[in-house]
Amino acid sequence: QVQLQESGPGLVKPSQTLSLTCTVSGGSISNDSFYWTWIRQPAGKGLEWIGRIYTSGSTNYNPSLKSRVTISVDTSKNQFSLNLSSVTAADTAVYYCARVSITILGYGMDVWGQGTTVTVSS
Amino acid sequence: EIVLTQSPGTLSLSPGERATLSCRAGQSVSSTFLAWYQHKPGQAPRLLIYGASNRATGIPDRFSGSGSGTDFTLTISRLEPEDFAVYYCQLYGTSWTFGQGTKVEIK
């Protein structure tokens, strides 16, 4: 059974870079039937898609965050990572990593990490 | 970027009642790329429906999705106590996006 686990600092200072890693266990991140993605939820607000990566390394980002976001994949470690630069208090949120299953019938984020809370504060 | 608008914002219902949630896209989209999620506080979201009408693994058949073009619907035929949560539609387009959510609360 595939599991995802986020890791990284829970506190980041304003203007610094938020860095999170998602470790995939129970399956290969190199499987071409999946995208790997990051989503966040600020307190009291809805879900916001951040970006996604394919095993080939191709990426796509939320236009509102694109100038500050980098998502990368390390197939040797079965991990993918999120870097969000120049953070402000508005980036305080629960951050989730998820797997997107690609099928002929449709796409869906079918496996999620438990989420990790990141607070931006000095 | 295509905007998804969900309605109503909050749905107040009793267990056993039928819930009908709407998701409207700003322009016509392929139903292949429309999904629904359930989200409870303190938990990760859960995939309910993918491809607009296909139930994900392990999802009870009281959950169903329908629609095409710009209008999509999630229906919960008979609400169970564990179904009270926030529901999001999501689109896999040029840019992926979530609707703002519908909260289904106990009346």
Image (tube, rainbow, N blue to C red):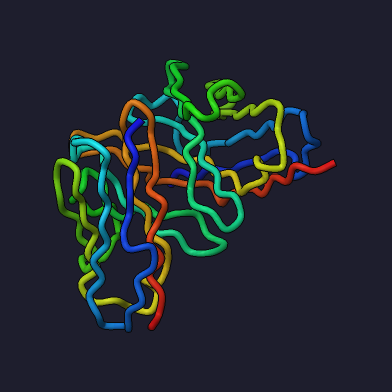
Q: Is residue A79 left or right of residue A108?
A: right
The residue lying furthest to the right in this view is A122
Query: In the image, residue B86 lies at what x, y percent?
Result: 42, 62
Q: Quadrant of residue B77?
A: bottom left
Relative vertical location of residue B69 with respect to residue B83 in this rendering, above or below: above
| Total numbered circles | 0
Quarter that holds the C terminus of chain A: top right
Q: Quadrant of residue B4?
A: top left
Query: In the image, residue B72 lies at what x, y percent?
Result: 20, 51
Q: Nearer the viewer, residue A68 or A111?
A: A68
Residue A25 visible in the displayed image = yes
Relative vertical location of residue B88 with respect to residue B97 in this rendering, above or below: below
Residue A73 visible in the displayed image = no
Q: Quadrant of residue A58?
A: top left
Q: Residue at x 29, y 76 (%)?
A: B79
Q: Residue at x 47, y 26 (%)?
A: A63
Q: Residue at x 67, y 49 (%)?
A: A117
Query: In the image, residue B15 lies at what x, y percent?
Result: 32, 83
Query: In the image, residue A54 lies at what x, y percent?
Result: 42, 23
Q: Residue at x 63, y 33 (%)?
A: A21
Q: Nearer the viewer, residue A3 or A59?
A: A59
